[in-house]
Image (cartoon, grey):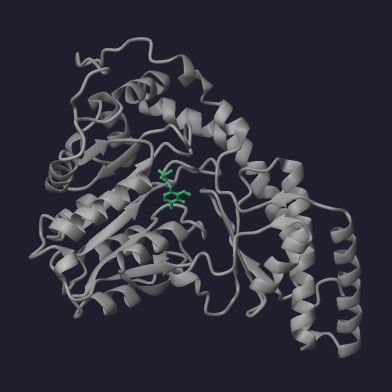
Amino acid sequence: MSETQPLSELSPTDLAAFRDAQQTAYDALVASGLKLDLTRGKPSAEQLDLSDGLLSLPATTTTPDGVDARNYGGLAGVTELRAMFAELLGLELDQLSAQGTSSLTLMKDVLSYLWLKGGVDSERPWGAEEKVRFVCPVPGYDRHFTLLEWFGIEMVPVPMTDDGPDVDAVTALVADDPSFKGMWLVPTYANPTGQVTTQEVAERLASMPTAAPDFKIFWDNAYALHHLTAEETKTADIVSLAAVSGHPHRPVLFASTSKITYAGAGVAFVGGSRETVTWFHANLGLGSIGPDKVNHLRHLEFFGTPQGVRDHMDKHRELLAPKFAEVERILDERLGGLGVATWTHPRGGYFVSLDVLPGTASRVIELAKTAGVALTPAGSAYPYRRDPDDTNIRLAPSFPTLAEVTGSMEAVATCVLLAAAEKLLG
Ligand code: PLP
């Protein structure tokens, strides 16, 4: 039998022989006592080391515009750090606020304010609506979905395409139904599929008619600067696109340095129209007299300029790109041509999205677990953890060492092949 013949074309005898060979390989894996983990979309220790210069900063306690960073105040964050990231994210200074360490917290804050008070363009608080629904491109980021679930916001999935979310599906949902109040979107190197939302899709999302006057695009640009190749993909300028289409308050932007400096001690940003940022501060100000400006100043001194951030990201790329190449190599060599899986080829971000034969993702994850390789639980990338086809597996190669990536991916490939052969044999 040919090495690259699709498994579905094998005779029952050949397929049974193939299954037996995979079972033997799998038993050897189990016996080898692996202890590997491909679940963690977080920076490795080597990546964190790149930012250890932060530990001896700031060298001063006064910001360039003369503010004592140690004191209360400055709710919007240190001006010069905001200016640095405004440039990197394609915004004006007053369209961006710098806050604490987590953009996810800012997403929860924004949702809470919308829920309790409504937005700048709301007729009433979202919590006073009979029903609130969100459009959720899938597969997507699990924490986006669990956050909405916590609010009791109903999630309606739409597929991700190579150009971003399926914009025809989105426009059809939101046009006539005012219960659709918003959507998630990771526009650059999406989690987990790596897709980049094109300018054309962004334009359509910015300009589409929505029955809800206060429809929001939660534009989570977590991977804006996280390129895996020399090409620096530019994110569409959603704030300008929304402004020219007459929906200036539609996008709310999020970003952070979690995967630029320290995931546990970085700076997070929230942005949008000037009115949106003012609204955010008005709500935030009830519970804060200002963010950690010392950390802002530390980051400002560490990078110096926007180019300093880009140069720093090149160093991350040098550490990350070989791990992603290894994932691709093993998937290609072990699964290519067998018709049992497809996978993404991300040019940035933190994940590879693997689609296995429908009905086998949970089996692959279970097999891997028994063999000592932790994979993200089945269905995680879907609202309510329901992967309708049981097909998607998120692979996160950033945290393990290169040798661990090799070991885990060889194991994953064996599990995919065994589960596929089992399925095809029925
Ligand atoms: N948004 C996306 C799409 C992510 O993948 C992650 C982390 O994996 C986050 C947000 C978390 O960001 P932060 O660390 O700023 O809370």
- Indicate left or right for 322 with 345 as reference: right
* x 40%, y 59%: residue: 144
The residue shown at (30%, 57%) is 218
Can the viewer see residue 332 in this picture? no
Q: Classify 137 as above or below 61.
A: below
* Residue shown at the point (46%, 42%) measured from the top left: 232
**In the rendered view, would you say 64 is above or below 212?**
above
Q: The C terminus is located in which quarter? A: bottom right
- In the rendered image, residue 164, in percent from the top left (x then y), is placed at 41, 63
Q: Is residue 8 left or right of residue 152?
A: right
Quarter placement of the N terminus: bottom right
Whether residue 106 can be seen here: yes
Q: Is residue 181 left or right of residue 192?
A: left
Residue 360 falls in image quadrant: bottom right
- Figure label count: 0
Measured from the top left, where is residue 49 in percent x and y?
Answer: 58, 26
Image coords of residue 423 (percent x, y): 74, 83
Image position, residue 312 (x, y; %): 49, 29
Q: Nearer the viewer, residue 6 or 13?
A: 13
Residue farthest along the left direction in this orientation? 123
The picture quadrant where one finds residue 304 is top left
Of residues 95 and 325, the one drawn nearer to the viewer in this rendering: 95
